[in-house]
Amino acid sequence: MWRILLGIVYLTAFCEASEYIFSYRVAARNGMLLNEKYYFSPAMVGANILRQTKNPYKKCTISHEAKTEKALLRDYKEKILECFLKWGVRLEDNTQVQNLQGKSITYLAIPPTRIQIEYADGIATIYALTHDINKTIKAIKE
């Protein structure tokens, strides 16, 4: 079991993955930015194994001049974030008033999302991967 797991880890380290898990979080206190976390992590398990498919309604196309996928993820952060913000975000606001002074902490977060990137020279298409219930039902029947 451990040999298989280590084999998968080494294989994904040498191969450039096109499936990633993405998450983003921004925290602001009283209107000032505290921190920003922007994560892309290669997916260790493929979408086919998890019975996930590309969502045609949650996709975006980015024109770029990057030479690799990693350069695209690093250099085109703003365009990628615009794409995810269109798909939906979670906003949490914790406002407290004490002695007539307001204190607020706001979190803007994109929860961890499995994505697939189809990378080509000049154009990258990012798809959100969603659970395909039809594949699950078919597997249960078999």
Image (cartoon, grey):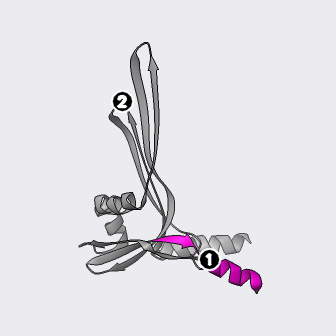
Question: Residue type at mark 1?
Answer: Arg
Dot 2 and dot 1 residues touching (CB under 8 Å):
no
Find the residue positioned furthest to the left: 65
- Relative to residue 95, is residue 139 depicted above or below? below
Q: Residue 119 placed where, x, y %? A: 36, 78
**Residue that appears at 29% across and 77% down:** 123
Q: Residue 47 placed where, x, y %? A: 56, 76
- Relative to residue 28, is residue 61 depicted above or below? below
Question: Residue type at mark 2?
Answer: Asn
Q: Which residue carries the number 1 mark?
A: 51
Mark 2 Cα shell of 10 Å, populated few (<14), some (14-19), many (≥20): few
Range of magenta residues: 128-141
Mark 1 Cα shell of 10 Å, populated few (<14), some (14-19), many (≥20): some
**Residue that appears at 64% across and 70% down:** 6
Q: Which residue carries the number 2 mark?
A: 30
Q: Is residue 42 left or right of residue 101?
A: right
Q: Residue 58 placed where, x, y %? A: 43, 70
Task: Identify the secondary structure beneath mark 2.
Answer: loop
Q: Along the line of sight, which residue is nearer the eye, 110 or 2? A: 110
Q: Is residue 79 left or right of residue 26?
A: left
**Residue that appears at 62% across and 74% down:** 50
Task: Identify the secondary structure beneath mark 1.
Answer: loop
